[in-house]
Structure formats: C-alpha cells, structure tokens
Image: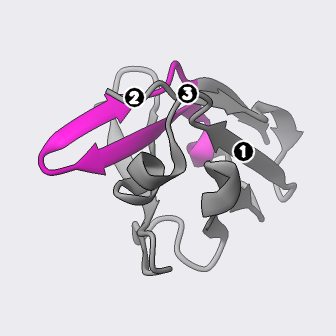
C-alpha cells in the first residue's frame, strides 16, 4: 500500500479550470517510480471510473470523456502527480481519487471533491 493525499478540488463555474495534486508522502522514490499513477472519479449514484494515468516513463492515457481537456503529469522526484482540468463541464462533478497501481495492487487516496456549476 502507498498512502496518497489529494488536494486542489473545489467549486468552479462551467468553462473554468482546476488543478488537482496528489502526493505519496511516505513512499520512497524508487517505490513511487514503480507505480502507474492515475486519477479516477465517482459521481453521485455512479460507479467509479477511470480518468487518466501516467507511467514513470511518461506514457499517458485518458478516458474519451476528458481527452483534450485534461492533462495528467507526474514529478517523480517529488512523488507527485497532477491533473490539470480545463473547460470543465457540469458532468465533471465528482469526487476525484488518486490511485497507484503496481503488479495488480492498487492504493487509493481519500478523494477530493470537484463541483462544476452551470
């Protein structure tokens, strides 16, 4: 398990931007680097869904619903990942979770609320 702490959520109007951050404060750098880091979200009454992921070597992946609007990045030396969210829509409202995946094991953060008002 890799303890993860998210921050950066909040309330924003449609069309606005937010930047989420996730840090693994107690992981040693080599352990952090061995994980694929990602963001998931869960809206009220819906299942948790994949948003974006980034591997150590810079490969990224996005869900179709956010591709072109969201950008995931990672700073391996600081054990952090970020999610830059632009052109936010009301349907992006959800609790956003940071995740760390390695060899079939996944760790979750506590989540941060993002609310987009129309």
Q: Residue at x 59, y 46 (%)?
A: 92
Q: Image height check: is 53 above or below 95?
A: below
Q: Helix, strand or loop at disc 2?
A: strand
Residue 20 - label: 1
- Position of the N terminus, as image quadrant, is top left
Q: Residue at x 12, y 46 (%)?
A: 104
- Give the residues drawn in magenta, as a range: 91-111
Question: Looking at the image, is mark 2 or mark 3 earlier in the sequence?
Answer: 3
Q: Is residue 101 left or right of residue 69?
A: left
Please name the residue that numbered disc 2 is placed on. 108
Q: Position of residue 45 (x, y in %)?
A: 36, 21
Q: Image height check: is 92 above or below 70?
A: above
Res 82 quadrant in image:
bottom right
Q: Nearer the viewer, mark 1 or mark 2?
A: 2
Q: Is residue 62 visible?
A: yes
Q: CA distance from mark 1 to mark 2?
A: 15 Å
Please name the residue that numbered disc 3 is placed on. 26
């Amino acid at each position: 398990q890799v303890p993860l702490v998210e921050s950066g959520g909040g309330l924003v109007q449609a069309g606005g931007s937010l930047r989420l951050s996730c840090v693994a404060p107690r992981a040693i750098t080599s352990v952090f680097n061995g994980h694929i880091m990602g963001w998931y979200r869960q809206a009220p009454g819906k299942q948790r869904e994949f948003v974006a992921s980034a591997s150590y070597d810079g490969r990224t992946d996005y869900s179709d619903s956010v591709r072109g609007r969201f950008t995931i990045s990672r700073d391996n030396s600081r054990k952090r990942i970020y999610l830059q969210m632009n052109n936010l829509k009301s349907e992006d409202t959800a609790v956003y979770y940071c995740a760390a995946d390695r060899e079939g094991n996944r760790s979750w953060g506590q989540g941060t609320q993002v609310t987009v008002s129309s």
